[in-house]
Every structure is written in structure tokens, then in C-alpha cells.
Amino acid sequence: MVRIHRYIEIFTKFIFPPLVVNDIETARNILTTLIAGGISILVFSFSMVMLLLSQAATNYSPRVLPSLISNKTHQVILGGAFLSSIIYNIITIIGIEPSGKDYQIPGFSVLIGIITALIALAAFVYFIHSISTSIQINNILNNIYQNSKSQLETEIEHDNGKKEFPDSKNWKTYNSIQSGTIQNISSTSLKSYCADNDIQLEVLFHKGEYLIMDSPLFKCNKELDKEEIDEILKNFLYQESEIVKDNYILGFKQITEIGIKAMSPGINDPGTAINTINFLTDLFAIRLKNLIIPLS
């Protein structure tokens, strides 16, 4: 591996000699500057993110923070571009020996460090643009609306394909073993388990509902042992964070909260309130399509 690195460095030095650093002090100064600059950019980015999140929680709603924090692009930029560049340059500067006639300066490694720093700088420019765009209220509302609409259409599609459910009045009721908010149900896994064991279940709650311990959770047409109950309970996701992709009802809730806060005396933003009414109207229209019974 070292021999391959040497061949690449010799080739680079022969083709592009100005790009390869041959002086120890110059290499150290370059890497030290890149490390210090990378740490400064990283600290500034984290500070700006915290400031924007605080502003979003104050002006809009604290419920929108999980969707902003879970942005994969921002996570890749902060963790992938910035941290990887800093760590690589630190490892490279540690590997530079102070003296020795037979020692060969890792000029190619220094060149890669410079390239990674330039990539991190370009990622920083994109990060500034992306975070400043994602924090705008119109984009926040549109993201909530799109996620709610997608989840809602999926739910409607599943409802249209359901068969007539049998009477469950005499089925055995099983209660919740813990308190918490059930934000999602692993329906695919639950259906597969029911089909494999020839059982039928009726869920007694809706997603996003807070249940206390021993609250009715589901009914089953058969008597279940402890192992079977545990397998079924694994498909109920207890989670306090509100992510719209898991439950479209949270989209209605978050858009409503933003609209109410926009009409408060402290914010006084009627334009945002009108936009929330438009988004809610469209979501309600989509939901009502599945509830309208034809007259003929």
C-alpha cells in the first residue's frame, strides 16, 4: 500500500510538480491552517444551526424541529465533509516526521488534504444556502404538506383495498404494557405475523394517541400466550418525537399550530395563516374523497 502511494506521488510530482509540497515546514503550516479553518467553520455551522432552530421553535412551532434536524443532507455535510477533512489533516500532520535524510515528505497526502479542504469549503457554501432555505416558513409548510399528503394517499390506498371485517364484540382485549404515544405501526410485519399464525386483530387506537398503561390496545379472535403477545407488541412504535412521515395526522397538527401562532399578536403574520388554511383545505379534501359515499 505504501509502495502504491509512493508511485502515485512520484507520478503526480512528474506531471504536476507545483502541486506537491516538498518542504516539511510548508506542509505543516498548510495542514495547520486547514485544521484551524475547518474547526472554525464547523463551530460556526453548529452555532448557526442552533440559532436557526431556536428561531424556528419560537416563531413557528417546536413540533417542526424533528423534521429540520433529521435532514440527511445537513448531517452528511457536517459529519462527512467537515469532520472527515479535519481528521484526515490531523492524521497527516502527525505522520510528518521532524527530520531524517531518508524520510520522504508525504506530498501527495498533503495534496489530498488540500483537496478535501476545498471540498469542505464548497460544502459549507451549499450548507449555508440549504439551511437558510429550509428554515423559511413557506418551505417548512410545503415539506409538512407534501409528507402529509404522501402518507395520507398511502393510507387511503390501503383502506380502499380492505375487506369487510368480522364482528369483534366477543374477541379478547389485550392492554398496553406501558405508557406513551404510539406514532406508528409496522403494518406489513403485523399482517405477515397474523397471516402466518392465522389470527385476526382489531387495533383499538389511532396513531398519535397517547395511551396509559393497561389501556385497551387491540382485540384478537384467539387466546394468545405471552410470547405471541410480545411479538405483536414489537410492531407498535412508542415515540414522543413527531415525524410527519410516520403519521399524517401530525401534519394536520403542525400546520394548525403554525397558523395559530402566525395569528398571535407577537407574530402577526396573516399571510402565513392564509397559507396554512390553504394547505389544510387541500389535505381535508384528499381525506374526504375516501369518505364520500356515492348516491347511485
Image: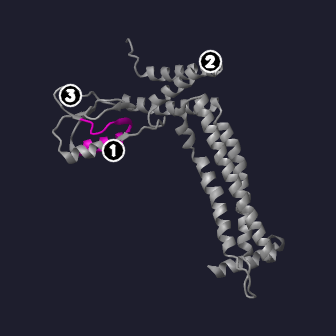
Q: Which residue lies furthest to the right in this view?
A: 18
Q: Tell me if I can see residue 20 in this picture.
A: no
Q: Is residue 189 magenta?
A: yes
Q: In which quarter of the image is the C terminus?
A: top left
Q: Give the CA separation, mark 3 to mark 1.
A: 22 Å
Residue shown at 59%/30% (left/top)?
58
Residue shown at 65%/45% (left/top)?
47
Residue 168 against residue 78 in the figure, above or below: above
Instruction: Tell me residue 68's x, y (percent).
Output: 57, 39
Residue type, mark 3 in image? Ser
Q: Give the range drawn in magenta.
A: 175-196
Tag 1 or tag 2, which sits nearer the N-term? 1
Residue 168 disc label: 3
Q: Residue furthest bottom?
A: 101
Q: Is mark 3 on a helix, strand or loop?
A: loop
Q: Give the CA separation, mark 2 to mark 3.
A: 50 Å
Residue at the disc numbered 2: 265
Neighbor class of circle 1 (other Cα within 10 Å; few <14, some 14-19, many 20+) is: few
* Labels 2 & 1 near each other (Cβ < 8 A): no
Tag 3 or tag 2, which sits nearer the N-term? 3
Residue type, mark 1 in image? Ser
Residue at the disc numbered 1: 189
Q: Quadrant of the N terminus?
A: bottom right
Tag 1 or tag 3, which sits nearer the N-term? 3
